[in-house]
Image (spheres, helix red, strand yellow):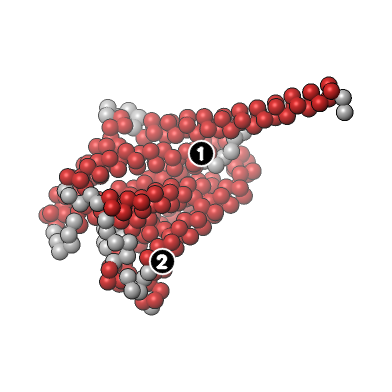
């Protein structure tokens, strides 16, 4: 092989590497643009803009404080309002991603048909935008828990898997729902009903112990309630922010803490299904849209 050929090959390899790096950088830039766009659309035309990310959870806390006091919700349970508000704010991250991802692909038909890029970026940017909004809503939550004396960060290490699992779940849901809604527009109606059912099956406004007690299965299998990924995720958030036990003490002999990792397994399954659905539908997006 001649020196000139070697030089050309070296240059070609460098060019290939440059193109690969430029491509990766290009997609990161597109993700940032789409995330910023999604956040701007959320508050488009509003006078307060991103301040609503802080104001909304504050007003939510105030609203639940008033009505919980009037209706005497769980009067016997200590720190019930803090328990409830934590659950609502965490749940809203998942619910917001679920709703916004419905048209993450179908609503960007012109982009999908005219520009080549990984289609996963569209639902991914939806999950990221909701994640940014969620992190902002956590600020007033932390202040509220601190002011009411219920903030307990002794188990804060559990917040790491909680955030990681919830983000992975949101990405999986966004990929799955965003893809299916391209081909089956009835999905948006199914999501509306399914989201409500999912909410009531998740211990957002009731204690995990109540869910375990109501589960119509043998005591030794009660831990299967953690196959709902949000059950385990919420338990970890409440452990990390409020110091609550992952599994209620009265159920610890029947449901070992290890059962909580069923939520991680369910999350991985949702993410895998989302990736599979996107790969199968990717080549047909342009034709259908």
Q: Which class describes the residues within 10 Å of circle 1: few (<14), some (14-19), or many (20+)?
A: many
Q: Where is residue 240? Give x, y as percent.
A: 31, 52
Q: Is 63 placed above or below 125 here?
A: below
Circle 1: element type: helix
Q: Position of residue 158 (x, y in %)?
A: 36, 53
Residue 93 in the image: above or below residue 217 = above
- Kindly tell me whether residue 165 is visible in this rendering: yes
Do we see residue 86 in this rendering?
no
Question: Who is closer to the viewer here, 56 or 235?
Answer: 235
Left of 52 or right of it: where is 148? left
Q: Secondary structure at mark 2?
A: helix
Residue 159 as seen in the image, left or right of residue 150: right
What's the residue at 32%, 65% (across, down)?
247
Which disc, if any, is residue 122? 1
- Residue placed furthest toward the bottom: 218
Residue 259's label in the rendered image is: 2
Residue found at x 42% / y 58%: 229
First along the sequence among labels 1 and 2: 1
Horizontally, is 173 left or right of 156 in the view?
right
Give the camera-side residue of 8 and 78: 8
* Percent position of residue 214, x then y: 31, 71
Q: Are marks 1 and 2 in contact (CB under 8 Å)?
A: no
Cα gap from disc 1 to disc 2, whole angstroms: 33 Å
Which residue appears farthest toward the left when viewing the image?
Answer: 70
Q: Residue at x 78, y 27 (%)?
A: 9
Residue at x-position 40% and y-position 62%? 260
- Residue 262 vs 101, above or below: the answer is below
């Amino acid at each position: 092989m001649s020196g000139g050929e070697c030089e050309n090959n070296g240059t070609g390899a460098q060019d290939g590497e440059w193109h690969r790096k430029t491509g990766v950088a290009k997609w990161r830039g597109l993700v940032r643009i789409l995330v910023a766009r999604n956040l701007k659309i959320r508050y488009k035309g509003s006078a307060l803009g991103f301040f609503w990310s802080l104001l909304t959870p504050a007003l939510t806390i105030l609203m639940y404080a008033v009505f919980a006091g009037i209706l005497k919700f769980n009067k016997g349970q200590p720190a019930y309002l803090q328990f409830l508000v934590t659950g609502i704010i965490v749940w809203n991250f998942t619910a917001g991603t679920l709703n916004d991802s419905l048209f993450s692909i179908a609503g960007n038909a012109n982009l999908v048909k005219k520009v080549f890029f990984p289609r996963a970026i569209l639902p991914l940017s939806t999950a990221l935008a909701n994640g940014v909004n969620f992190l902002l809503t956590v600020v007033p939550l932390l202040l509220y828990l601190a002011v009411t004396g219920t903030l307990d960060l002794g188990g804060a290490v559990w917040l790491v898997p909680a955030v990681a699992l919830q983000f992975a779940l949101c990405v999986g849901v966004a990929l799955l729902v965003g893809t299916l809604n391209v081909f089956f527009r009835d999905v948006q109606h199914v999501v509306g009903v399914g989201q409500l059912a999912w909410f009531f099956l998740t211990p957002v406004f009731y204690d995990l112990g109540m869910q375990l007690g109501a589960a119509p299965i043998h005591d030794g299998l009660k831990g299967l309630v953690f196959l709902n990924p949000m059950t385990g995720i919420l338990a970890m958030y409440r452990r990390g922010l409020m110091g609550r036990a992952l599994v209620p003490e009265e159920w610890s002999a029947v449901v070992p803490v290890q059962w909580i990792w069923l939520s991680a397994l369910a999350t991985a399954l949702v993410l895998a299904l989302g990736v599979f659905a996107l790969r199968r539908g990717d080549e047909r997006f342009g034709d259908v849209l």
